[in-house]
Structure formats: structure tokens, C-alpha cells
């Protein structure tokens, strides 16, 4: 097998802007592109700017923890991808907006070159937010001009379409990172993102049911020409034993019972790594739960502090917490409740979506499946081969979507993934069990 091509070194500011474009790498992206790509591109770029409208310039600069990134960095990085993967190889006479940005806003693409350390992104005080916005404006205009050329290579459109989906991913990350930042403010009343900010879809506890599925030899994974990431392919068959899936996500009221029963203090419910995590970090409740002076619990959201609810799903929990809760419920009910596998989750959504609630509008749902390649998996060719496959170790799969997921971005085959201790995302849990358990 020959090595996948990589981008050539980027010219510096002194290079002749009239020099011919380098030979484009073969990205080999297998998906089709919508006819209204230019409008989709424009819309997604405008949405990112709308997300920062409630923020101050200071809000856009601060990095509240190593796993989060400043909003300004997200705005620049999503632009960097269009400039690096589309303009550099395909724009005649390409010249970078600023040669330093190649390193400053590279996330993890080692084939492109060095990156600024992720935990130190908040220290990039220069360029300013205004300069990043100018960067966005110029790159957008150049992308549109490239798409309008009659001889524009088809691969350009596919790379732009990938960039649109990439920016949607970062729009969700922007909201989760902003939430974490605002949660650190000592005065919650001063830390409201927006009164109409996204919030998880509610469910009626009285309508909760157990959905039985026959299982058997079923097919999961993406097939067809619609957009999907490489980690969703290839479509393949798996065997499922008969199982049951809860129609709703675990609610905040459900979880409060676990907290009040000492769930975080009893080792019996926890995976070994999870118990170590609880002890080392002093975890006593989901992220953003705060105990009031009167002893009750409140949750912190993008809309500020809100009371817990029987209709709201519990969010911002780790895999460790989800597995511990399932073990606790199994003990209390005498039924062997557990986390679903990702194949069970996808099969249920494909065949019984009408019986399920909060599929992709509340919280990403932890599964017990490790993030591994599907049989026959092949990463995309070219520089974008680093997009997903390199992370297939020490991660667990989440399925569905959340209130922060952009409209139209979720699908049944989507595979999100995070390490077991991650919980700043909108992550929740839907229980499963074997049909005869």
C-alpha cells in the first residue's frame, strides 16, 4: 500500500502570489455534495458568528480547562481547515492570510505540521478576535470564488462539504465549552449565556416504556452516498440477542435518587477506573449540579441555574457514572439493566424510532462499546485521514445527539466518542437489558 499524499509545505509571506497552485492531493472522499452547497457553507459560517453574539470579547478568549477551547480558537480553527485543506492545494496563486496561523490553529493534524499545545490555547491573545473575524471573512470570500469557477475540481466541493460538517461539530463544542467557562463564574446570575439558549428535550415520565427488540442478524453502519464520517463505515452485519431499550433517557429526578442513596459513596456500583476517578476528583454529583444553601440541588445550564426536573434528562455525566447508575438500578429492580451496545442502539433507532424519545435532541448517550474500527474500515485518503481513525483507542462510543447538536447534523450511524471520564459534553444515558433478564 502506498502512503497517502500530504500537503506540501505552505509558502511564506514572501512567496510570489502568482505562482501556480501545487498539485492537489487526492482526498478520496466518497460522499455526494448537495446542489445548494454554497448556501449551506454561508449558513453554517453565519451560525458560528451567531453563537458568539451573546459573548464579550473576554468570554471568547478564556480557556477554562485543558479539554475546552476558547470560542475565538474555534472560530479560527474552523477557518483554518477551509484555508489549509481547500484553498492551499486548489486555489491558483494561493497565499496564506497569515503564515503563523498554520501552527496556531492546527488542532491535531501532524501531517500538516506542528500545533500549539491544546491546554495553552487560551494564551493565544494575538491575533485579536477582530483579526480572527477578518480571517474568517477573507477565507469565506475566497472559498466562494473557488466554488464559482467553471473548472472547479469536484474534490473541492467534497472538501467544502466536509468542512461544513466539521464546523457544525465545533458549533456544539463551542456551546459545551462556553457552558463550562460560565459555570466557573462565582456569581451564577451573572453567567447566563442566553435566555433562549438550547436546552435538552423534555420527556413525560408517565410515558416511559420498555421497548422490546428481537435482535438477530442486523446491519449497522452507514451505506449510501449521503454524508458520513469514515468511522461510520463500512456497513456490516452483527448478531444481536433479543434485548430491551428504555424509551426515554434517565431523568434528573431518577439520578437524584441515586445521589441521595449514596451512589457516589458506595464502591459496589463502580468500575475500578470509575471508583478511582470518583475518589481522586471528589465527585459527588453530575457536573454543574450545585447544592443550594437550603440543601436542595440546582443544575447550571446555558440559561443559568435551573431546578432539577423529572422531565429533564440528566446530562453532563461520564461513562463511569452511567455504568454505576445502571448497576444500581439493576440491584434495585432485580433486572439486569446495563448500558446498550452501540449496535443495539443503532438497530433500535433504525427499526423502532417511533417508540423512542430524546433520540438526538437531548443528550448524547453512552454505550458500553469501545471506539474501534468496523470490520473493513479504511480511513479517508490524504491529509484528512487523521480525522477519526487515529483516535480508535481508549475511547468509548456515544450515540444520538444533544440539544447543542446543529439541526440536520445527527444520524443513526453517527459515532461520537470520548474517554470514560469526560462529562463536559451534553452526555446522558439510556438503559438496556437482555430480553430475558
Image: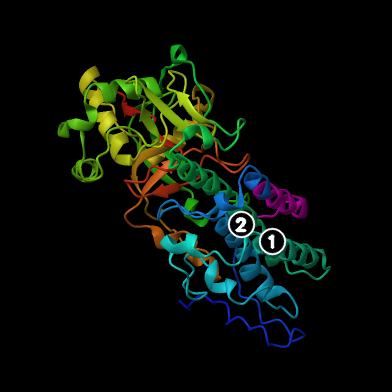
Q: Quadrant of the C terminus?
A: top left
**Horizontal and vertical percent for residue 151?**
81, 71
User: Left or right: 142 with respect to 261?
Assistant: right
User: Left or right: 94 with respect to 432?
Assistant: right
**Horizontal and vertical percent for residue 344?**
39, 35
Question: What residue sits right under mark 1 in the picture?
Answer: 136
Q: Are marks 1 and 2 in contact (CB under 8 Å)?
A: yes
Question: What residue sits right under mark 2 in the picture?
Answer: 75
Q: In this picture, is 326 found above or below 102?
A: above
Residue at 48% x, 78% y is: 3
Q: Is 271 part of what is drawn in magenta? A: no
Of the two numbered discs 1 and 2 on the same chain, state the one appearing first in sequence: 2
Q: Residue furthest top?
A: 206
Q: In this picture, is 329 found above or below 8?
A: above
On the question of residue 81 being in view, the answer is yes
Residue at 55% x, 71% y is: 382
- Disc number placed over residue 194 in the picture, else none: none
Q: In this picture, is 413 found above or below 296?
A: below
Q: Nearer the viewer, residue 370 or 244?
A: 370
**Horizontal and vertical percent for residue 63?**
47, 54
On the question of residue 217 being in view, the answer is no
Question: From which residue to which does the magenta span run?
Answer: 31-48
Q: CA distance from mark 1 to mark 2?
A: 8 Å
Classed neighbour count for the residue bearing mark 2: other residues with Cα under 10 Å, few (<14), some (14–19), many (≥20): many
Amino acid at each position: 500500500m502506498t502512503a497517502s499524499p500530504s500537503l506540501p509545505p505552505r509558502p511564506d509571506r514572501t512567496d510570489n502570489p502568482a505562482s501556480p497552485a501545487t498539485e492537489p492531493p487526492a482526498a478520496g472522499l466518497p460522499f455526494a455534495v448537495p446542489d445548494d452547497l454554497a448556501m449551506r457553507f454561508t449558513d453554517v459560517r453565519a451560525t458560528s458568528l451567531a453563537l458568539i453574539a451573546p459573548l464579550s470579547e473576554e468570554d471568547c478568549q478564556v480557556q477554562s480547562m485543558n479539554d475546552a477551547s476558547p470560542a475565538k480558537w474555534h472560530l479560527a480553527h474552523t477557518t483554518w481547515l477551509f484555508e489549509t485543506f481547500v484553498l492551499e492545494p486548489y486555489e491558483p496563486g494561493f497565499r496564506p492570510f497569515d503564515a503563523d496561523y498554520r501552527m496556531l490553529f492546527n488542532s491535531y493534524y501532524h501531517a500538516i505540521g506542528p500545533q500549539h499545545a491544546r491546554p495553552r490555547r487560551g494564551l493565544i491573545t494575538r491575533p485579536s478576535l477582530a483579526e480572527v473575524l477578518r480571517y474568517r471573512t477573507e477565507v469565506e470570500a475566497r472559498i466562494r470564488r473557488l466554488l464559482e469557477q467553471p473548472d472547479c475540481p469536484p474534490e473541492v466541493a467534497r472538501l467544502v462539504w466536509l468542512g461544513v460538517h466539521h464546523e457544525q461539530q465545533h458549533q456544539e463544542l463551542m456551546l459545551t465549552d462556553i457552558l463550562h467557562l460560565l459555570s466557573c463564574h462565582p456569581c451564577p446570575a451573572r453567567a447566563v449565556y442566553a435566555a433562549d439558549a438550547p436546552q435538552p428535550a423534555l420527556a413525560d415520565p408517565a410515558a416511559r416504556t420498555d421497548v422490546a427488540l428481537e435482535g438477530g442478524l442486523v446491519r449497522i453502519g452507514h451505506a449510501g452516498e449521503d454524508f458520513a464520517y469514515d468511522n461510520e463505515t463500512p456497513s456490516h452485519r452483527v448478531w444481536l440477542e433479543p434485548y430491551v431499550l428504555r424509551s426515554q433517557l434517565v431523568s434528573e429526578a431518577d439520578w437524584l435518587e441515586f445521589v441521595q442513596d449514596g451512589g457516589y459513596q458506595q464502591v459496589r456500583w463502580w468500575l475500578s477506573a470509575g471508583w478511582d476517578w470518583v475518589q481522586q476528583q471528589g465527585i459527588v454529583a453530575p457536573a454543574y449540579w450545585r447544592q443550594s444553601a437550603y440543601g436542595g440541588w440546582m443544575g447550571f445550564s446555558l440559561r443559568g441555574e435551573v431546578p432539577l426536573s423529572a422531565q429533564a434528562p440528566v446530562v453532563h455525566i461520564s461513562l463511569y457514572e452511567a455504568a454505576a447508575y445502571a448497576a444500581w438500578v439493576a440491584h434495585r429492580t432485580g433486572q439486569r439493566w446495563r448500558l446498550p451496545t452501540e449496535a443495539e442502539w443503532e438497530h433500535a433507532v433504525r427499526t423502532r424510532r417511533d417508540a423512542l424519545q430524546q433520540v438526538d435532541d437531548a443528550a448524547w448517550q453512552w454505550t458500553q462499546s469501545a471506539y474501534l474500527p468496523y470490520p473493513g474500515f479504511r480511513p479517508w485518503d490524504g491529509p484528512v485521514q487523521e480525522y477519526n481513525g487515529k483516535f480508535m483507542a481508549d475511547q468509548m462510543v456515544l450515540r444520538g445527539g444533544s440539544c447543542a447538536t446543529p439541526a440536520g447534523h445527527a444520524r443513526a450511524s453517527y459515532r461520537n466518542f470520548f474517554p470514560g471520564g469526560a462529562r463536559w459534553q451534553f452526555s446522558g444515558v439510556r438503559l438496556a437489558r437482555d430480553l430475558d433478564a
